[in-house]
Amino acid sequence: MKNILKISGFLALLMVLFVSCEKDNITTTVEELVGTEKQMEADLKQTLGKSANGWVMMVKSTLAETAYVPVVMQFDTIKNMVKMRSVYGSAVSNQSTYLINKGVSGVLLNFSGGSAVSSLMRMDRKYGDVTDYVFKVLSVGAESIKIQCLKSGEAYKKEGGPIYTLFKRPENWKWADDALLLDLKKTEARANVISTNSVLTLNYIPTGEKVSIGSHFGPGFDGVLNSWQLNGDPFYSNASANVFDKFYLFYAYVNYSKGTISDDYEDYPVARQGHNALYFIPFYERDANTWASTDKFAKSIKTPYLVINEVIRTGTNVTIKVASYDKSGKEYITGEYRNFN
Amino acid sequence: MKKLFIYTLLILAGISSFLSCSKEDKVTLEKENLDYFAIINKPKEKWNALDSLCDTIYRDYGVKIVYEYTPQVIRPNDFYYPPTYDKALAYTRKVMKTLWLEPLKKNFPDYFKRETPIEFILMGGYYHGHPTNTDIAAGAGFNGQFYRLGMGGVNNLDLSNKAAVHDHVVTLWHEHAHNQDVKYGRGEIFDRISIGTYYKEAWNTKTEPQAVTDGFFRKYGGFAPEEDFATTVEHLTRFPKNDALTLINSNEKLKRKYNLVNKFYLDKGMDLHKLQSIVYDLVYKK
Amino acid sequence: MKKYLFSALLFLMCTATLTSCKKFLNEPFDNRLELKNIEDYAGIVKKSYPTRYDLFNEVLTDNYKLVPNLMQDAWKPLYIPMYMYKDDYQYTLNYTSPATAYTHLYNKIYMANLVIEGVLTGGGGTAEKQVVMAEALLIRSYCYFILTNIFGMHYNPSTYATDMAVPLILEVNKENRPTYSRSTVKEVYDQVEADLYKAIDIYEKNPAAVPTNPYRFSMGAAYAFATRLSLYKNDFEKTVQYADKAIGQKGRVLRSLKTDYDVLLKSGWAFYAQQFNDPSSHPNIIMAVQSEYVHHPIGNNWGGFYLAPDVVAQLTDNDFRNKITANAGTVIDKSTYIIKNNTGWQTSRYVYFNMEEVLLSRAEANLRGTAPNPANAILDLEDLRKVRLEKYSPLNTAGMSNAQLLIEIYKERRIEFLSEGLRWYDIKRLGLTVEHKMDQNSSVIDATLVKDDKRSALQIPVNARIGNPVLENQLNPR
């Protein structure tokens, strides 16, 4: 009898062991998981609104190695609206919607309305490497948010595109403010800038290298601007990407070998005016020369864009302070256009 | 005996601890009970002006206007791009409300009640099979559906350009015709009119007069029976009755198509000629 | 006494049991047909014709591109891996596939073997018995010909002694569960030829008894088969010889596609497709088979595979073969398919051999043989073009080299036999390169098949390996 008791006690113990083992198998409950997701969602919601000047996403252009193209996003977490500034331009009232959705991979940051992000997804990879306007949220921290494009590109390709680490907009990024520092569509901005010889000097911060290039902004397109805006603007003529104001473009003549102010020019890349920025991305396929010149210029200055952080006018002297940033938003190039010696 | 028990117990405990260990390594997150795709409506306090407008339209006409894209709305292997907020707002007000739903409900109440899709997707651009390919499909690209309609090109539609707006609304009725086709079927008799003579991929190499001679309202209608049906509706919605009939009477096949399609719509309470004059007046005379 | 009685009773009972046993065994236990005489064997042989389960091979060719959003979902696990030249397709699905073809063809081989083994010893006239056996030999030969061309590398005298084909089973199995090992391509081809030529010999000796029914191996069909076999072996002399014989039997009659097109205009797609491969109204068809619908992934608007852009480009407006195509999806899907069969789930007819193939094979052989005869090749080619083009004008062949002429013939072959299952074997024997994309809008090519690609010998299907473990050690190299 005693033995039987002992044996049954022993068996019961054994069973308990196995049962507990099985329970061990499930360590995460659905409730906990929902909790984690909810926590991340809440964190994201809060953090997005915690940068008064917005967050920056640096996208990569195929035209440059070190220079990355900034997109600044200012979130209104009350109304789920977002304002975006990119070097490519700005929308009329500059507002768009965003949503925080859930996907099979967790929390999604979804730029649900047409914006700079959906536009970049649609454009050629020279403009940026964005492959979706929906992003998986990988991590949320006080100073950075890590997101990844949900799609990686074409149809039937794997999930998960490029990863971006958003950071808070640096205070000295004046170009990203609302105020337009240099709008060459306006007469007052054109004075001593358009049809004026100048020199572009660029300092490459990591190497200490300095470059001077003779420069001249020509009004060559002014007469045909309307028709170019309609048919030549790669954003406007592509409805899916058409989120920016109509562009302004001009010939930015250059003299690579003579880095001083002079009347001689070797080449004529085309510059387009973005939001407080100039960008040099070849876009007009029917004209091979313009295409090649612009491509050459972007590659030789190692950036497809130059933001304009300050314009200083003293009499007829004009200094346009420009910069280009690296992946983490640090200054990679600083420099200026100057129309006086 | 006692000792034996204890030893066995010890050994078993040892084994079981190893077992639980190895099991713990394989812990995976049990996610299948989470409904990631649940559609959560935006809470009212987050509404913007467009959300309020969409809500009004939903209450008045029962159509959910979708201007924000989520993976739940847009299928993953095709590429559609959302419209910008400003364009979508202006478009919803003018095209959705004033030019489509309002006159539809007022003039064709029965047809409105039965044949209005419950969802309408605004597209900034057009359908693309590849994210950055430059070729586009002019139509909305997903209107062969039962309950959903959509229109492309919202970002580029200049609402002050009357001709462009008229063309857009006519195209909307073309797209809606696909919807009706899928729902009821255009029928074997319609298909037999031009059977074997469709242009297929070569439609774009034909001229419009050639297409009319061949019995199509437009060369695009020569692509396939589906487009043949939709371009018939489009023709009746685009041109005033007399003009439309002049062309129709010039060709036996067009006449037969017209008779079938006109009856198809009249049976459901829609007089396409009347619709044409209403749309025209709204765009050009107001 | 008691014991005696008991023994007697036992003895009687035993006898009774045995007696009844005897009677019982006299009757087949399930009323099955006993093969006794010529009618029985002829009945079997009529049932031994295989269905065209090899038509899946169109998916492997450059004739078709994949459009996944226009594909029945249930077919994706079967046809997409196949299109990517992968072996791990879902073999349990009973649609047209290597797995179904393998099982089906061996079933038919079993029936043919039954006839070959027994017919001569059964009752009936000698000539009739000989011819029934010949018909069974032709079926067995055809089945092995298809099997080796699907599962083996293409016939190539420098490697065929080691290239593996399929197991040769030439007798009705009498064991419980035998295992079979694969024979070489040479062995199978030798067998195919032995059977074929033996049958032709019998046919030629007993012409009166040879079937003329277009659903069976007639004299013409046997010759057409020999034409194809010889072409696949690069034996151009024999190709011409048997093509001539086939034409002698059936006449040089080609399909008038205009007549089919007129049927379409008059009666619509359904009737057009129903009659398209009807031999009674299409004398160009040398041999056909009627079976359940097997054109799953192609030839309809839900199959997912549509004509490749270069094929569509070749089908000009002036070509009647363009007029029997239709579009799936919408204008943006760019999905064209050619209709040669009923596209519903009903019985349809499929072609084994037709005069177009005989003619184009002869034309090819006339250019590739040791004594090329381009003039004859042009005649054959033009004969076909005359009945395919709406406004016919002869090719400008003046100054064309034989190689250039050959290109024209291959182009014609490709579009003439669209969806008929011949292109895959042409790709194998001519060493063509095939590039397949998952996403037609992408520039990325996801699978490329090159000349003598190992994957052109499809893997022995899993269902064949189950229960025959020998094959596990004889898989096609990858």
Image (cartoon, rainbow, N blue to C red):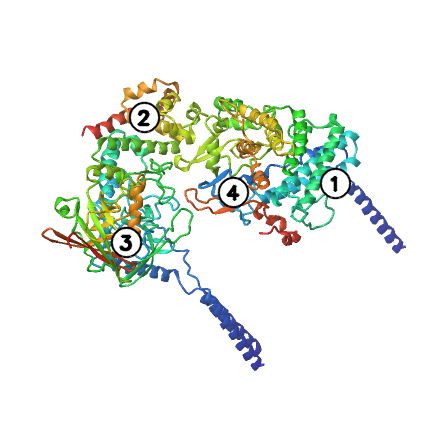
Residue denoted by label 4: C434
> Disc 2 versus disc 1: distance between alpha carbons?
73 Å
Identify the mark at residue C399; answer none if there is no mark: none
Query: Which of the two discs, 3 and 4, sits closer to the camera?
Result: 3
| Classed neighbour count for the residue bearing mark 4: other residues with Cα under 10 Å, few (<14), some (14–19), many (≥20) | some
Q: Residue at x 44, y 26 (%)?
A: B188
Residue denoted by label 1: C28
Query: Which of the two discs, 2 and 4, sits closer to the camera?
Result: 4
Residue C300, how many percent across, how many down?
Answer: 49, 35
> Disc 3 versus disc 2: distance between alpha carbons?
55 Å
User: In the rendered view, would you say C388 is above or below A182?
Assistant: above
Residue B32, how many percent across, how many down?
Answer: 42, 55
Left or right: C139, with B209 as reference point: right
> Disc 3 versus disc 4: distance between alpha carbons?
43 Å
Residue denoted by label 2: B235
Per the image, label 2 sits on a secondary structure element best described as: helix
Query: Which of the two discs, 3 and 2, sits closer to the camera?
Result: 3
| Circles 3, 4 touching at the beta carbon (< 8 Å) | no
| Circles 2, 4 touching at the beta carbon (< 8 Å) | no
Q: Residue at x 62, y 45 (%)?
A: C152
Label 4 vs 1, first from the N-terminus: 1
Q: At label 3, which amino acid type do we have?
A: Ile
Per the image, label 1 sits on a secondary structure element best described as: loop
Q: At label 2, which amino acid type do we have?
A: His
| Circles 4, 1 touching at the beta carbon (< 8 Å) | no
Residues flagged by tags 2 and 4 on a common chain: no
Q: Chain of mark 1?
A: C
| Circles 3, 2 touching at the beta carbon (< 8 Å) | no
Nearer to me, A72 or B149: A72
Identify the mark at residue A301; answer none if there is no mark: 3
| Classed neighbour count for the residue bearing mark 3: other residues with Cα under 10 Å, few (<14), some (14–19), many (≥20) | some
